Amino acid sequence: MGRGEHLGEFEALVLTAVIHAGKRANGTAVYREIGERSGRDPSLPSVHVTLRRLEEKGLLTSDTGDPSPRGGRPRRYYRPTPAGVRSLREFQEMWHKVWGGLDLPDPETLS
C-alpha cells in the first residue's frame, strides 16, 4: 500500500469484524462483533460509513439480501476482497513488529 493507503485502527476493527461475522456480515452484525471482541462501543453510523469507505477502497465487496419480513430496505452483506485480507495481514504484521520485544514499564513507577 502506498502512503495514506494504510488501514486505520477502526478500519482494521471493521474489516476484522466482517471476517468474524462471515456470511451474516451486515452493518448490525459488524457493529456487534466490534463490541463483543474489542469492548468498544462505536456508533452504528460510524460502522456503516467505514463499511462503505472500505468498499470504495476495494477492500470489501457487498451484495444486498432480501428485504426484512417487517419491511424496509434489503440488508447489505459484506465480505473481504483478496486486497482486504492482504491489507489486514499487513496491519497485523506491522503491529507484531511494533510490539515485538517491547517491555512496557510499570506505570506506577513512572513520574
Image (tube, rainbow, N blue to C red):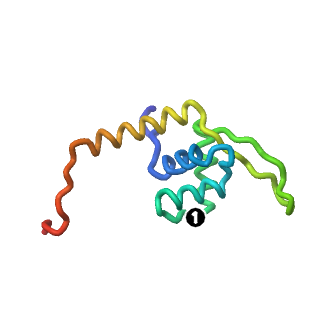
Quarter of the image where the C terminus is located: bottom left
Question: Residue 26: horizontal and vertical position, in percent?
Answer: 68, 51
Amino acid type, label 1: Ser
Residue found 86% across the figure and 59% down from its top: 69
Locate the N terminus by quadrant: top left
Answer few, some or many: residues within 10 Å of disc 1's Cα (few below 14, many 20 plus, some between 14 and 19). few
Residue 96, percent across and down? Answer: 33, 41
- Is residue 8 shown left or right of residue 110? right
Q: With respect to residue 29, does 18 lie above or below?
A: above
- The residue that appears at 84% across and 53% down in the rendered structure is 67
Q: In the figure, residue 63 lies in which quadrant? A: top right
Task: Locate residue 29, reporting x and y percent.
Answer: 64, 55
Q: Is residue 17 above or below residue 28?
A: above
Please count the marks in the image.
Answer: 1
Residue occupying the point 21% across, 47% down: 102
- Residue highlighted by disc 1: 43
The percent position of residue 31, horizontal first and vertical second, equals 59, 58
Image side of residue 70 versus residue 90, left or right: right
Task: Choose between 1 and 9: the one closer to the eye.
Answer: 9
102 relative to 37 in the view: left or right: left
Judge whether 46 appears above or below 13 on screen.
Answer: below
Q: Which residue shows up at 48% across the image and 36% down it? A: 87
